[in-house]
Image (cartoon, rainbow, N blue to C red):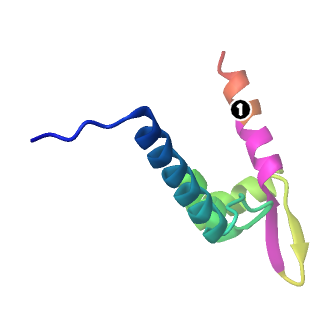
Amino acid sequence: MPQILTYEDFKEFEARILKEIEEIKKALPSISPKKWLRSSDIKELLGISHGKLQTMRNNREIPFTVIGGTIFYSLEDVNKMLDAKKQRKF
């Protein structure tokens, strides 16, 4: 025979679920996008080759910073570049 749930049963179940969700959220590391990306990240993000990325740097199409021989790109700058290119098409 089916069991009838009361409002109190439902509220108890809801409280247990919310508690479980909070525990899961605490257990997960905070996920935030990286502020600085390497060349490999940019190539994957934009779907371009190493040569194309080099050409974009040479033509000053994409801002970059060099630290100790490693090239870094600001995610914010890359997004601005993409937005600027998108606006030119309209």
Which residue is under mark 1?
85
Q: Magenta segment, principal secondary structure?
A: helix
Residue at 32% in and 37% down: 5
Q: Assign the N terminus to one quadrant of the image.
A: top left
Camera-side residue of 49 and 58: 49
x then y, percent, for residue 69: 85, 82
Q: Position of residue 82 (x, y in %)?
A: 70, 38
**Quarter of image, res 37:** bottom right
Task: Specify start and end residues of the magenta stretch as a single range.
Answer: 70-82
Residue drawn at x 46%, y 38% as measured from the top left: 8
Looking at the image, is 81 positioned above or below residue 67?
Answer: above
Residue 45 position by quadrant: bottom right
60 left or right of 32? right
Residue nearer the viewer, 59 or 18: 18
Q: How many marks?
A: 1
Magenta segment: does it hold 77? yes
Instruction: Work out whether 6 lies above or below 90.
Output: below
Element type where label 1 sits in the image: helix
Determine whether, in the image, residue 18 is placed left or right of residue 5: right
Residue for point 49% across, 40% down: 11
Question: Left or right of 82: which side holds 17?
Answer: left
Residue in view at x 58 percent, y 56 percent? 19
| Kind of residue indicated by mark 1 | Lys
